[in-house]
Amino acid sequence: MRLTQLAHSILDQYLQPGNLAIDATAGNGHDCCFLARQVGPTGRVFVFDIQRQALERTAQQLQEQGLAAQVQLLHHGHQQMRDKLPTGTQGKIRAAVFNLGYLPHGDKNTITTSLTTLPALQQAKELLCPLGIISVLAYRGHPGGRDEAAAVELQLQKLATDKLQLSRIESSGPVLFVLAPDRHD
Ligand SMILES: C[S@@+](CC[C@H](N)C(=O)[O-])C[C@H]1O[C@@H](n2cnc3c(N)ncnc32)[C@H](O)[C@@H]1O
């Protein structure tokens, strides 16, 4: 199973209709469509990207799959999530999903970096509800990717607590980190 699919199957155990979720990197919209389907029309997904092209691709996917109504597109860096989310969402986010690196079939020089990914992870944790989960898929094959993955792991180790435990799933390419409570309902 690819790590993107594995991430979705883990998130599936935590997400329910009506939940609030963050997609921190819109990209081509695959994660966003997954999240929008999970939270359903009564839930909401807040999706960030710094590239207009990524948000346009995501919007198109959402339209085609009939999921646009429950998604808010935000043309901002995820390091601004605390300020850009609607008031009242603090402590209510069930899942925050990071899929790092560059936009596939896009500009390979516009990449996520630890300079912004680390503060975004800190903010995501503060926004989570008690049974919330953060998943981070980090790629190590592009310049800077390995350093970012290492920095992300250190940051997640700092954010982990007795109640919020860090798992690391290794593959020959990307690495998946999951910060989640060990029980869910
Ligand atoms: C690997 S892609 C995301 C894939 C996407 N989740 C999907 O399912 O198709 C990484 C994305 O991160 C975006 N990005 C880079 N820096 C960012 C930042 N500071 N905040 C938000 N998005 C960022 C890039 O523009 C790119 O679209």
Image (cartoon, rainbow, N blue to C red):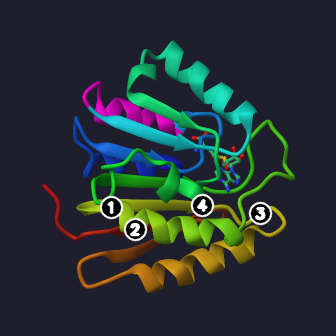
Q: Which residue is mark 1?
A: 128
**Three-letter amino acid code at the position of disc 3:** Gly
Residue at the location (33% across, 57% down)? Answer: 90
Q: Which mark identifies residue 79?
A: 4
| In the depicted structure, whether residue 184 falls above or below residue 19 | below
Q: Which mark identifies residue 50?
A: none
Q: Is residue 111 left or right of residue 133?
A: right
Camera-side residue of 107 and 126: 126
Camera-side residue of 105 and 72: 72
Q: Quadrant of the C terminus?
A: bottom left
**Three-letter amino acid code at the position of disc 2:** Lys
Residue 90 lies in the magenta stretch: no
Give the distance between the C-alpha atoms of the residues marked 2 and 4, in whole angstroms.
12 Å
Give the distance between the C-alpha atoms of the residues marked 2 and 3, in whole angstroms.
27 Å
SS at badge 4: helix
Q: Is residue 160 left or right of residue 24?
A: left
Q: Which mark identifies residue 125?
A: 2
Of labels 4 and 1, earlier in sequence is: 4
Crowd class of label 2 (few under 14; some 14 to 19; many from 20; radius 10 Å): many
Crowd class of label 1 (few under 14; some 14 to 19; many from 20; radius 10 Å): many
Q: Which mark identifies residue 141?
A: 3
